[in-house]
Image (spheres, helix red, strand yellow):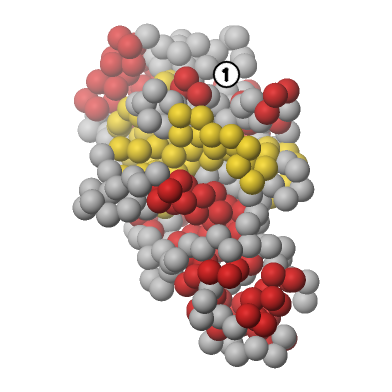
């Protein structure tokens, strides 16, 4: 078997299979994974209860570190954005959002993105490749290493750890579902990160067959859907995925997800002046949401590269929210974080000139 480059990508069973192949005891798999994900070591030599001969075999077969930090930027609101270089010379971005002793991390799942949504800067990069599970996990571990190295504390006064994961960085997570599933299972594993499913959110632009597969796999996570418009014509113009799976098909998949998981679904809804933030748009959103177990996360449009799209005024936003809430639909407004360092929703994109994002 051809093993993945990064050891963090392997499941426990795969690691046991490799150990068997190299004539090592399979119980070592649990020891190795605890060093990787509980102790979160950065060198093979820190695995002190793993024999030196086995550590040498591991070093020869696998990489321990998948990402190299090129830079990190700190926003005036405390949000931090990292630019990481992958082993093959590409770049991804990861964002940490601190709030009241909790640390949420928005992870990338692909290098670039093929979805080509009009209001997202990542779309301008095009698509290069999927990230391995080990690379995605290392985004999270890199944030934990930063928290530890800088002595940041949680609400209980202990060294802080990432508390929430949002698969909403670069890329369409459901187009890399195999690796995203591996990441969620590793994070959910009680022997490793022990992170609850409700602390992990996978966001999709609306890849309908993969929503069903997410349920079939029993991936431990919550689901968010970037709805952004209730009008097929407009949604197709800004989100090409809608030309393949229009809103009606998307809602069928959402309904099946809710029925089979008994979970809420979050609709992400970007508010764009004179387009999605109007009284008519509010009525259409109510029509779709009222009969369903859904919550709406409204996001004021962040600066992008399309000069025809503009953020609504604060008054327009308040009127929109009030109309939706009057219909007993649960809606919250996401306060923009990290805008000054281009870390807000839809702003992640690597530019080669000067490694600026």
Q: Decide which of 254, 40 is in the foreground and name it.
A: 40
Task: Please give the name of the residue rendered at 52% of the width and 76% of the height, measured from the top-left corner.
Answer: 48
Residue linked to disc 1: 304
Task: Please give the name of the residue rendered at 59% of the width and 9% of the height, measured from the top-left corner.
Answer: 308
Q: Is residue 143 above or below residue 178?
A: above
- Image check: 135 left or right of 294? right
Task: Please give the name of the residue rendered at 72% of the width and 63% of the height, measured from the top-left corner.
Answer: 5
Residue 58 position within the rendered picture, expressed as x and y whole percent measured from the top left:
67, 74
Q: Is residue 41 above or below residue 29?
A: above
Tell me the element at label 1. loop
- Specify the quadrant that holds the N terminus: bottom right
Residue 134 position within the rendered picture, expressed as x and y whole percent measured from the top left:
60, 59
Residue 42 position within the rendered picture, expressed as x and y whole percent measured from the top left:
55, 60
- Image check: 205 left or right of 266? right
Task: Please give the name of the residue rendered at 29% of the width and 25% of the height, measured from the top-left corner.
Answer: 324
- Specify the quadrant that holds the C terminus: top right
Can you see residue 37? yes
Q: Would you identify the image quadrant in which residue 221 lies?
A: bottom left
- Image check: 26 left or right of 3? left
- Image check: 144 left or right of 47? left
Can you see residue 236? no
Residue 163 position within the rendered picture, expressed as x and y whole percent measured from the top left:
36, 51
């Amino acid at each position: 078997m051809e093993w993945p480059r990064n050891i963090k990508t392997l499941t426990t069973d795969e690691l046991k299979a490799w150990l068997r192949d190299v004539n090592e005891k399979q119980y070592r798999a649990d020891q190795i994974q605890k060093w990787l994900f509980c102790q979160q070591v950065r060198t093979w030599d820190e695995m002190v209860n793993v024999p030196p001969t086995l550590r040498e075999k591991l070093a020869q077969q696998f990489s321990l570190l998948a990402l190299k930090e090129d830079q990190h930027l700190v926003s005036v609101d405390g949000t931090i954005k990292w630019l990481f270089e992958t082993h093959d010379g590409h770049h991804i971005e990861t964002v940490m959002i601190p709030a009241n002793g909790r640390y949420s991390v928005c992870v990338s799942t692909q290098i670039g993105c093929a979805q080509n949504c009009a209001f997202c800067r990542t779309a301008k990069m095009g698509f290069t490749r999927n990230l391995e599970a080990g690379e995605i996990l290392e985004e999270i571990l890199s944030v934990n290493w930063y928290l530890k190295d800088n002595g940041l504390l949680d609400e209980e006064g202990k060294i802080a750890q990432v508390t929430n994961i949002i698969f909403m960085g670069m890329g369409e997570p459901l187009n890399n579902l195999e690796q995203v599933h591996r990441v969620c299972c590793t994070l959910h594993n009680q022997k490793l990160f022990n992170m609850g499913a409700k602390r992990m959110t996978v966001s999709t632009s609306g890849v309908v067959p993969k929503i069903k597969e997410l349920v079939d796999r029993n991936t431990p996570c919550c689901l968010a859907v970037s709805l952004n418009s209730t009008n097929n014509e407009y949604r197709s113009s800004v989100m090409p995925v809608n030309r393949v799976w229009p809103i009606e098909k998307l809602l069928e998949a959402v309904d099946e997800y809710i029925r089979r998981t008994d979970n809420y679904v979050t609709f992400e809804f970007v508010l764009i002046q004179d387009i999605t933030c109007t009284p008519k748009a509010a009525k259409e959103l109510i029509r779709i949401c009222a009969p369903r177990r859904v919550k709406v996360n409204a996001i004021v449009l962040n600066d992008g590269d399309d000069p025809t799209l503009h953020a609504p005024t604060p008054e327009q936003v308040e009127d929109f929210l009030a109309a939706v809430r009057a219909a007993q639909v649960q809606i919250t407004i996401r306060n923009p974080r990290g805008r000054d360092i281009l870390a807000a929703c839809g702003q992640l994109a690597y530019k080669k000139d000067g490694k600026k994002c």
